[in-house]
Image (cartoon, rainbow, N blue to C red):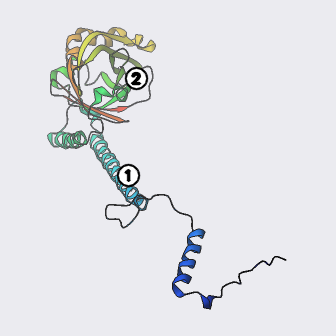
């Protein structure tokens, strides 16, 4: 009859301390999964995946800086609009101190232009714009000849830019003083081509004076004033030459032309001007 020998279990007291510690270590290793290879930093202190918090802080700092810049621009634009209040776009002249104040604010905005290469992003220039300030002025005998002292009122100035056709139309609206329903407009059409990343060359193509329907009542008087001084009128508003786009964002555009004039325009809801 075969006899199976059964090894009695070893008691802890029978195992040497070294063997006991080795067996416990092996049990722990079976319980803890072996991690895949972990990349560590050069100094070996911590795994690389401990570091994303550094990138989060950098991103937060960049976002904060952007917000500060946006707020600075918004503040400068508010200051410019405040300076432009009550001067009728500067078309009939302004005090020299006011002119200096406006031009200093314009320079500050130009120095922070968010679109440094505007002709490479013409979609920001496209659409309808309304003139809010210009250094072009109509003074003295010019104002008298055009009936702008007590007969004719200059109303809104618009510019419509079609980048697909490389065309721009300047529209100067006018009316009989005190009779806003009796109005007309001077339209000057021009083509443009890109000369540099900031400049366009402008070629004037044609111009028309158009009376609105009710304007025919004063047609013989008002239209004759403009027609007799048509060359003078075009000499003031003719866009021929070049224009440097010195600032443009989603709501404001600033430009300087070859005659030394400054133009500040605000985006306007597109419409048939």
Number of marks in picture: 2
Would you identify the image quadrant in which residue 169 lies?
top left
In the drawing, does residue 232 fall left or right of residue 38? left
Residue 18 vs residue 272, the one in the foreground: 18
Which residue reaches farthest front?
1
State if disc 1 and disc 2 touch (CB < 8 Å).
no
Q: Secondary structure at mark 2?
A: strand
- Residue plotted at (35% across, 61% down): 41
How far from the left and from the top, in percent, is residue 65? 33, 52
* Residue under pointer 2: 179
From mark 2 to mark 1, how far is it between C-alphas? Answer: 52 Å
Residue 243 vs residue 181, the one in the foreground: 243
How far from the left and from the top, in percent, is residue 92? 22, 30
- Residue plotted at (31% across, 42% down): 81
Instruction: Please determine whether, in this image, residue 140 is positioned above or below residue 111.
Output: above
Visible in this render: residue 208? yes
Would you identify the image quadrant in which residue 171 lies?
top left
How far from the left and from the top, in percent, is residue 158? 35, 24
In the drawing, does residue 142 fall left or right of residue 170? left
- Residue plotted at (56% across, 83% down): 20
Would you identify the image quadrant in which residue 96 lies?
top left
Q: Secondary structure at mark 1?
A: helix
Visible in this render: residue 176? no
Instruction: Please determine whether, in this image, residue 155 is positioned above or below residue 63.
Output: above
Q: Residue 63 has which mark? A: 1
Instruction: Please determine whether, in this image, residue 73 is positioned above or below residue 188.
Output: below
Q: Residues within 10 Å of mark 2 (few under 14, many from 20)?
A: few
**Of label 2 and label 1, which has the lower sequence position?**
1
Q: Residues within 10 Å of mark 1 (few under 14, many from 20)?
A: few
- Location of the C terminus (image quadrant): top left
- Location of the N terminus (image quadrant): bottom right
How far from the left and from the top, in percent, is residue 24? 57, 78
């Amino acid at each position: 009859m075969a006899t199976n020998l059964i090894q009695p279990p070893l008691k802890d007291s029978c195992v040497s301390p070294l063997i006991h510690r080795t067996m416990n270590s092996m049990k722990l290793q079976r319980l803890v999964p072996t991690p895949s290879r972990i990349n560590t930093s050069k100094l070996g202190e911590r795994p690389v995946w401990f570091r994303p918090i550094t990138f989060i802080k950098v991103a937060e700092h960049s976002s904060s800086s952007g917000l500060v810049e946006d707020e600075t621009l918004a503040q400068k634009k508010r200051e410019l609009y405040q300076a432009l209040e009550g001067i009728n776009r500067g078309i009939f002249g302004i005090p020299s101190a006011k002119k200096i104040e406006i031009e200093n604010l314009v320079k500050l905005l130009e120095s922070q232009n968010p679109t440094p290469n505007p002709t490479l992003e013409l979609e920001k220039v496209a659409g309808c714009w309304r003139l809010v300030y210009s250094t072009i002025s109509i003074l003295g005998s010019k104002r008298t000849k055009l009936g702008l002292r007590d007969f004719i009122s200059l109303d809104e100035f618009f510019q419509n830019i079609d980048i697909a056709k490389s065309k721009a139309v300047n529209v100067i609206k006018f009316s009989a003083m005190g009779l806003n329903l009796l109005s007309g407009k001077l339209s000057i059409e021009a083509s443009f081509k890109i000369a540099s990343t900031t400049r366009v060359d402008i070629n004037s193509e044609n111009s028309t004076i158009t009376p609105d329907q009710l304007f025919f009542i004063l047609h013989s008087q008002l239209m004759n004033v403009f027609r007799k001084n048509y060359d003078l009128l075009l000499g003031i508003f003719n866009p021929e030459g070049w224009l440097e786009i010195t600032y443009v964002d989603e709501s404001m555009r600033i430009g300087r032309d070859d005659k030394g004039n400054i133009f500040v325009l605000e985006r306007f809801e597109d419409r048939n001007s």
